[in-house]
């Protein structure tokens, strides 16, 4: 069971790489359609990028905020033998919520829905941090 905690980590990593690939695709498209300029990327100053690119960029940056705590708690659970069924279920729940957060953010960007999913994922993450010490 201890190794099972690694699968949600791999899934979260896949989500991050998926967002990165989408970001690259949208940036290349924006550059090819002359909606963005290569000069912008030297200092990230100037005319900027279209909203369709900026939203993916923000989502990509989000993947290196709270998910860092997710990776840490999963590794702690694996190392200290605390990767029980509850922890694994919580880890998969967190990844599912982060996927939903990315979809809400990138597809429709409804701020209210995005915030609700974001907060729910953070509650799951907080639970994981509490569960490991119980």
Image (tube, grey):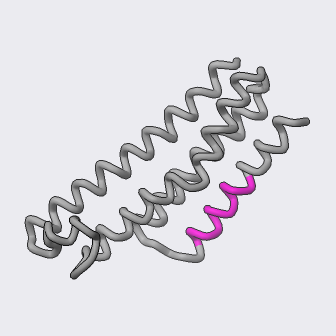
Residue at 34 percent of width and 70 percent of height: 54
Residue at 27 percent of width and 76 percent of height: 45
Name the dominant secondary structure of the magenta segment.
helix
Residue 67 lies, in percent from the top left, at 58, 48
Residue nearer the viewer, 110 or 72: 72
Along the horizontal axis of the image, is 69 left or right of 84? Answer: left
Residue at 50 percent of width and 75 percent of height: 110
Q: Which region is colored magenta?
A: 113-123
Along the horizontal axis of the image, is 62 left or right of 83? Answer: left
Along the horizontal axis of the image, is 123 left or right of 27? Answer: right
Against 119, residue 2 (above or below) is: above
Q: In which quarter of the view is residue 106 placed?
A: bottom left
Residue 107 lies, in percent from the top left, at 39, 66
Query: Quadrant where the N terminus lies?
Result: top right
* Number of marks drawn: 0
Query: Quadrant where the C terminus lies?
Result: top right
């Amino acid at each position: 069971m201890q190794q099972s905690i690694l699968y949600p980590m791999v899934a979260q990593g896949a989500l991050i790489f998926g967002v990165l690939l989408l970001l690259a695709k949208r940036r290349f498209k924006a550059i090819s359609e002359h909606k963005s300029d290569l000069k912008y990327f030297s200092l990230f100053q100037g005319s900027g990028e279209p909203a369709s690119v900026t939203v993916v960029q923000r989502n990509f940056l989000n993947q290196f905020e709270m998910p860092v705590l997710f990776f840490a708690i999963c590794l702690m659970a694996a190392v200290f033998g605390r990767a029980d069924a509850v922890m694994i279920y919580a880890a998969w729940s967190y990844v599912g919520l982060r996927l939903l957060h990315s979809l809400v953010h990138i597809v429709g960007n409804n701020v209210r829905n995005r915030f609700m999913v974001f907060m729910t994922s953070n509650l799951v993450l907080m639970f994981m941090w509490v569960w490991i010490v119980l």
